[in-house]
């Protein structure tokens, strides 16, 4: 059976046809609508899946935010503003006429990445560092989503009590500092107004402020990983997302983690499925592998 898998992020939407062997046969992308209103998202999704929907027997959505009873609840409205309580499953079923499952994108990615090494480990955490910072937890071989879908939202744990305001309403969250949005928001002077991609490029060129912003992100993420190890005693942490997979970033995180006492050390790896982890994890869940 073929699954129409969809990934909804803060900056882009992706869709693909995925077979039961997790092979992608078609993939499409488009920017997340700038207005981020319900009508704009419906229109973008309809256009995105139109060439694919007749070739699938079911659909699976991996989306940023909390997924609760098929509805999208935006924990950080800045990432998907205007979409709080958006009926995600019903919308896709109306568009494509396919039975649909929806799950948080980092939880989906965690499930896909876990299966890469399920014979070796039973406890794993996936962290995505991109527009925001998200996470997914696999404990004793089971995906943990929580009673309300909140489990794994590690980007909204505390990094700095005197840090910047987070879009979720708290102060000093990991996401407010380490994410692409957080990196860009902290830029000053000649870097003010630059996006994270530009800041990474400037850091590679030797710009001092850019390098410090990237290092701060990596340091905060390393501290989060140490905290996560203390809580979960996970065997592996997998890093994904556009920031997490940027050249040199994982090495920086690893170096900062090594500064912590050894009891907080854990194996760090880059996402095996790279930017398709969410799509593939959602497809696996639609196949009933949970």
Image: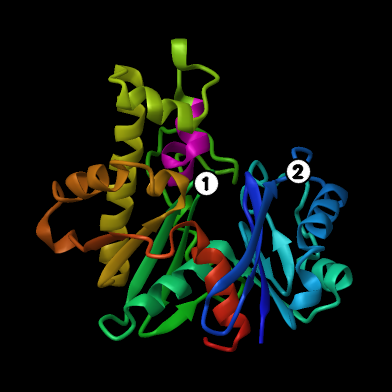
Q: Is residue 179 above or below residue 23?
A: above
Question: Residue 178 colored magenta?
Answer: yes
Query: What stretch of residues is rendered in magenta?
Result: 174-185
Marks 1 and 2 in Cβ contact (< 8 Å): no
Q: Quadrant of residue 125?
A: bottom left
Q: Residue at x 48, y 77 (%)?
A: 144
The residue nearer to you, when weighing 32 against 218, is 32
Q: Residue at x 20, y 44 (%)?
A: 256
Q: Is residue 207 above or below residue 268?
A: above
Question: Residue 283 colored magenta?
Answer: no
User: Quick one: label 2, few (<14), some, or many (20+) residues within 10 Å?
Assistant: many
Q: Which dot marks residue 241?
A: none
- Residue under circle 1? 132
Q: Residue at x 28, y 71 (%)?
A: 234
Q: Is residue 110 above or below residue 78?
A: below
Cα–Cα gap, marks 1 and 2? 17 Å
Task: Name the outermost residue toward the front.
Answer: 25
Q: Position of residue 218 (x, y in %)?
A: 31, 41
Q: Is residue 206 left or right of residue 197?
A: left
- Residue under circle 2? 33
Say if residue 26 shows up in the picture. yes
Prevailing secondary structure class for the magenta stretch in the rendered image: helix
Q: Earlier in the sequence, mark 1 or mark 2?
A: 2
Instruction: Please give the count of numbered marks on the rendered protein.
Output: 2
User: Quick one: label 1, few (<14), some, or many (20+) residues within 10 Å?
Assistant: many
The residue nearer to you, when weighing 56 against 40, is 56
Q: Position of residue 193 (x, y in %)?
A: 55, 19
């Amino acid at each position: 059976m073929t699954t129409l898998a969809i990934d909804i992020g803060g900056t882009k939407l992706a869709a693909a046809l995925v077979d039961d062997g997790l092979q992608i046969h078609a993939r499409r992308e488009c920017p997340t609508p700038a207005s981020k209103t319900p009508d704009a998202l419906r229109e973008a999704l309809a256009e995105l899946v139109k060439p694919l929907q007749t070739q699938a027997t079911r659909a699976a959505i991996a989306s940023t935010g909390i997924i609760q009873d098929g509805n999208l609840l935006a924990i950080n409205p800045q990432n998907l503003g205007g979409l709080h309580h958006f009926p995600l499953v019903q919308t896709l079923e109306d568009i494509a006429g396919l039975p649909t499952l929806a799950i948080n994108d980092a939880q989906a990615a965690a499930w896909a990445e876990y299966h890469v090494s399920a014979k070796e480990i039973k406890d794993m955490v996936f962290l995505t560092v991109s527009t925001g910072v998200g996470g997914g937890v696999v404990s004793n071989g089971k995906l943990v989503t929580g009673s309300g879908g909140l489990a794994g939202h590690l980007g909204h744990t505390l990094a700095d009590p005197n840090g910047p305001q987070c879009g979720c309403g708290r102060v000093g969250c990991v996401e407010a500092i380490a994410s692409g949005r957080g990196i860009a928001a902290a830029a000053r002077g000649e870097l003010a107004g630059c996006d994270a991609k530009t800041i990474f490029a400037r850091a590679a060129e030797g710009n001092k402020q850019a390098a410090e912003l990237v290092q701060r992100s990596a340091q905060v993420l390393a501290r989060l990983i140490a905290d996560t190890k203390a809580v979960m005693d996970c065997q592996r942490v997998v890093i994904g997302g556009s920031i997490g997979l940027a050249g040199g970033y994982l090495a920086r995180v690893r170096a900062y983690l090594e500064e912590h006492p050894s009891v907080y050390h854990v194996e760090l790896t880059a996402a095996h499925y790279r930017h398709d982890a969410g799509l593939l994890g959602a497809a696996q869940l639609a196949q009933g592998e949970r």
